[in-house]
Amino acid sequence: MNVKEIIKQLTLEEKAGLCSGADFWRTKAVERLGVPQMMVSDGPHGLRKQSDEADHLGVNESIKAVCFPTGVTVASSFDKDLIRVMGETIGKECQAENLGVVLGPAMNIKRSPLCGRNFEYFSEDPYLSGTMAASQINGIQSQGVGTSIKHFVANNQEHRRMSSNSVIDERTLREIYLEGFEIAVKEAKPWTVMCSYNVLNGVYASENKRLLTEILRDEWGFDGFVVSDWGAVNDRVEGVKAGMDLEMPSSFGVNDQKIIDAVKSGALSEDDLDRTVEDILTIVDRYQSNRKPESVFDRDADHEIARKVATESMVLLKNAEVLPLSKDDKVAFIGEFAKKPRFQGGGSSHINTHKTSNAVESACKYLGLSQDEFLYASGYSVAEDSINQKLIDEAVDMAKQADKVVIFAGLPDAYESEGYDRTHMRLPESHDALIEAIAQVNEHVVVVLHNGSPVEMPWIDKVSAVLEAYLAGQSVGQATVDILYGEVNPSGRLAETFPKRLEDNPSYLFYVGEKDTVEYREGVFVGYRYYDAKNMDVLFPFGHGLSYTSFEYKDINVSTSKMSDQETMTVSVRVTNTGECKGKEVVQCYVVPPKSLDVIRSVKELKGFEKVELEVGESKTVEFTLDKRSFAYFNTTINDWYVPSGDYEIVVGKSSRDIQLSSHVAIESTVEIPMVCTANTLIGDLLQVPEKAKVLEPFMQEMEKVFQGEENDDIAAEAITKEMKEAMFRYMPLRNFISFGNGQFGHDDLDVLLKALNN
Ligand code: BGC
């Protein structure tokens, strides 16, 4: 397809028409010019391809497909290769179903544990989110199918998601909320980006030129089309001007007409419209030229890939020598989730699974037992959502007969979903009560959790083990049994902090805002950045996760101890499996910036991670590359990333709170932050900049004399210490030369001084 040629031949009406969907899931065709339709589909962890009764809430049936583990689950694998494989598999499925773009990955930051859609999102950390998203995109797009990273940006709650204004300062926006998208765009070039429903700092994301054109395209080099979230368009013409290309779903011609009218009246330039059409057709062309109609959607094979992803992602949070279970243990599975697991979330990502596995059935198969021979009690009923004492009593009786008990608990569908937020961070009362009751009669209690986001665990000290299975996709039962019985050694790590209680979360006081205003007042202190800065006890820290084996770290090496902010360096460590079984370790590298009074920074930030598999006794060297961005913060004076000169610590560990080794690098900045001096500039700040200090020197000498004179007159002169004098100058604005200058320094002198200082 020669896109430019086609645009020349399109009528104004056809061009405007191409800027919105033909229906819920398809772009428009222009048959006379050979422009085909392209179908898109949710996303992100499998296909929700709908045919007739279309909707964006997962209400109506879609084709039978494979449900992979959700975003937070797969992020917990910390495994870039694994998520890439999952992406490739989804890409192949799209080819078989003739889909052009899959709507995902969803990569908003998990600002609060309460966001209803947290299960779909990766992490509280932008580096982890961006890196995992990039791998998933690379996997999907390697199959000639596009992705749509979403929701761009600052859609961190479901409450009033279509109207709320996320008010975020520039530095926080850049460092926390945009950074993951930036990594994904630069590293993986997604074909499309989905703009979010919400308003960002007063302007709807769907008509935010700064966001969609200046940052996304001009700064990051995005070259695909921007699609609106379903129904996110507010002012269509402003959207076109801002770089919002494709309106979805169809607006039945209403907004197309607005575009036509605006071009005719001159309110919208035809060049802007042509650019929009070009963005869309370029991707439609890419879709068409990458078609592989011979592809097959092998659901059973993909189920096994989903199982592998699930086992590599589950996080063993606690284990007091109770896991792995042995085939000889007399084990009881308790909790309705053991038979009816919750393995995906509600809303647009909801997949019509072709088959699912549950833990009871999978354990029976593994142990060669019939379900009648296996100890199981429901303990609660998801449908009731209240404590059922009879079910608890039955479960307690059963727990008494078992050597070990595995309780399946978590959040039922109604507790977290797209469309609304959670109101608290607790499990259902019936689940907490069941765990408490069983823990009283059995000393070997394992809790398996199915949830998309942190929960409080008031019973944590009374149970022996906790396995965070998250929402693990359709092979959840098999994957859980693989881990419980040690067929697979757990290797997931938390992609988010589990605070002890909701009130500890940094966004707690401001979440979900006031009516349509949500101020992100915690700033850059999201997740572990906050808990670390406050030195606060948490239930489980970011990056935490246990294994059935043990690992030792030694020999940290940095390629240089000194470099400029333009250079890169490598850090390496040697990791050894010192335990008794094969396993995988996630080696995490964090940068600790120097303490400074000029800029408030996090205690440490994740800048690298690698997952390595080690046989018993085996060692491997793990290497990380660090560059300017690893050390930088976003400086709003120069509107760019900036690394202040100083000594940076590089720490490597098993989690954000389990640091094993550390080293240092001294970084020299090559960037000068321009300093505009005014009458209110502090003397202390000027003295820190050598050339300014030089200009100031003669004036300082004069002032010294004046002070000297005053001191001589004053009986209390001895009380003025050197430190006091220095402090007085340090915090004194230049204008005070006039008030304290004994009449020898006037406004004219100040002007001369300022001119000299500002060159
Ligand atoms: C969701 C998107 C989804 C779209 C289409 C919207 O409500 O926010 O994530 O891709 O619907 O289903």
Image (spheres, rainbow, N blue to C red):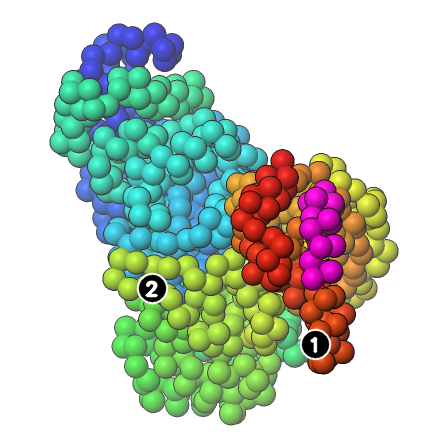
Q: Write down the residue under mark 1.
A: 714
Q: Write down the residue under mark 2.
A: 512
Q: What secondary structure predominates along the stretch shown in magenta?
A: helix
Under tag 2, what secondary structure? Answer: loop
Residue 701 shown in magenta: yes
From the viewer's perspective, tell me whether residue 75 is left or right of residue 570: left
At 44% across and 44% down in the image, what residue appears?
A: 105
From the viewer's perspective, tell me whether residue 256 is left or right of residue 212: left
User: Which stretch appears magenta?
Assistant: 691-706
Q: Residue furthest bottom?
A: 440
**In the rendered image, the vertical position of residue 324 relative to residue 353, given as above or below:** below
- Image quadrant where one finds the C terminus: top right
Disc 1 or 2, which lies upstream in sequence? 2
Separation of disc 1 and disc 2 at Cα? 59 Å
The image shows residue 711 at horizontal and vertical percentages of: 72, 71
At 66% across and 57% down in the image, what residue appears?
A: 684
User: What residue type is disc 1 on?
Assistant: Asp
Would you identify the image quadrant in which residue 431 lies? Answer: bottom left
From the viewer's perspective, tell me whether residue 228 is left or right of residue 475: left
Residue 192 shown in magenta: no
User: What residue type is disc 2 on?
Assistant: Val
**In the rendered image, the vertical position of residue 33 relative to residue 554, given as above or below:** above
The image shows residue 116 at horizontal and vertical percentages of: 35, 61
Q: Residues within 10 Å of mark 2 (few under 14, many from 20)?
A: many
At 79% across and 50% down in the image, what residue appears?
A: 665
